[in-house]
Image (cartoon, rainbow, N blue to C red):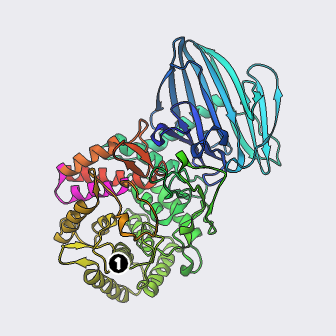
Amino acid sequence: MPLPIEDYALIGDCHTAALVGRDGSIDWTCLPRFDSASVFAALLGDAGHGRWSVAPTDPDATATRAYVDDTFVLVTTWTTSTGVVEVVDFMPFGDRRANVVRRVRGVSGTVALHEELRLRFDYATALPWVRQTGGEGRDGELVAIAGPDAIVVRGPRLTASDHAHTADLEVSAGETVDVVLTWYPSHREPPEPLDVDAQLAATTGWWQDWASRGEPPVAYADAVQRSLLILRALTHEDTGGIVAAATTSLPEQRGGSRNWDYRYVWLRDASLTLQALMMHGYREEAHQWRRWLLRAIAGDPADVQIMYGLAGERWLPERELDELPGYEGASPVRLGNAAYQQYQGDVFGEVMVALDEARELGDDDTDESWPLQRALVQHVEEHWKEPDNGIWEIRGEPRHFTHSRVMLWAALDRAVRGVERHGLDGPVDRWRALRDEVRAEVEQHGWDADRGTYVQHYGSTEVDASLLQIAQVGFVAYDDPRMTGTVAALESDLLHHGLLTRYRTESGVDGLEGAENPFLTCSFWLVEQYARSGRLDDATALMDRLVGHANDVGMLSEEIEVETGHHLGNTPQALSHLALVRAADAISRARAS
């Protein structure tokens, strides 16, 4: 059985990632990209679906772990009755190959360890053909091939047993044993062995150099720094695409069916991530993401999707994979995401807001970028009255969601600002008039005067945590009575043990069975709202609690099971971490004012 979600730590090379458990087992890895088929998938089943374990044989061994400062080099320190060893796990950055390195270092005494390697290609549907070369002892080489994929593993010689390969080794103080796994296309020869010392130094240096260029706020600096690092780790080095999470199908409710594939690039999440990175000094990431955007949505604005593959792929069909039983039996396991076919009007606002903030920070528009934005706004002009599926990708009936309408207003507002403040060209009078028309419609149909709150969608009395973004994009002020009234309604209807859910699933609006747990992003948005509206004590109390839900290495998933503190949903969740950054910024500003 897999561990609790919070017991995993991420290692990555900005092309893909792996999840390493507290027990020394790598239970999730897709090679060579985030969205490639898995090599290890025990996270969504059991050991038979693929894993790679390196751990002491002592059943009473205890482990502590931490990243080397400002990196994704993970050091797990094992203490046993006979000695202490460190296992250093990392994925080399800049090697241009998909490598996973596990270095065992003896600290004191002598420790016996057991290695178990179970390679299962293509989401555990392909058992590879394996051959082994090399001599006895610690210079073995194992090659595994299935279809287009091949893996070479170099380290202690492995022994085949029951569709697994194992090794037993002893490591004494001062000794080092390296095991290196490398993916390569099966039609090529295995690549040359890795220089682990050089790659460890280079990878550590790269991450620390990147981190040193950031500008974390005074408040919650450590949590913000780790969050920014996670956002960078989820950004593909070559394409600039920012995945929403490193995993698929981790459930929003234990045993439930709300299990989705998040290894793709949502325009919304990527735009918000871009804002978080830009506000903390990472301007090159703004350039890279804008280039990705231009490539991904080039063409007819009518063809714009809410999400794409890492390189801008448009075809992301969703299917259910029966071969994997799901995390703790939560099924189905899904590959692909049918939401790519949805219309979500809010993404136009998120993209325009992000690009406007880039301009405000001095990132001038290229000749291609502003024409693209004009085309997006033209599409808004032509389609703004259509119902949509909303920010939460409702799989029920499309509706006029208030959040979506506000974000369409924001798209027009930022287009107007581009002309008025930055001297760009465009039909500003027409945009301004339509912006005012959208505002008037929202105030007429998206407002519940009896209760004094904005509503989830036109004709409803329900509220939705996405309404917290109304103030974030400037539609109303944070301390406007309309906003504070909306906050009161959210607190009344959506707080669950002090944390916010997205909406009331009991309303049936999403067309899905089952419920879900508090959504971390929404609670961070509430922190921001509190801080910006004069409720600093409430903001700090909620922020302390939320940051406390991060695991021992600073990772947050999508949701929290409040009763137990367990993480739920895909991990690490970009949206959770970027909302943490915004919340910390808001608290820092409030303390300084």
Crowd class of label 1 (few under 14; some 14 to 19; many from 20; radius 10 Å): many
Question: As drawn, is 561 to the left or to the right of 199?
Answer: left
Identify which residue, 330 or 348, lies in the foreground. Answer: 330
Residue 34 % position (x, y) = 60, 52
Residue that label 1 marks: 409
SS category of the residue bearing label 1 = helix
Identify which residue, 268 or 557, lies in the foreground. Answer: 557
Amino acid type of the residue tagged 1 in the rendering: Trp
Residue 521: in magenta span: yes
Residue 298 % position (x, y) = 58, 74
Residue 478 % position (x, y) = 22, 65
Identify which residue, 383 or 319, lies in the foreground. Answer: 319
Q: Tell me the quarter of the picture where residue 381 sits.
A: bottom left
Residue ID at (58%, 69%): 296
The stretch in magenta equals 520-537
Residue ID at (22%, 56%): 530
Residue 125 appears in the rendering: yes
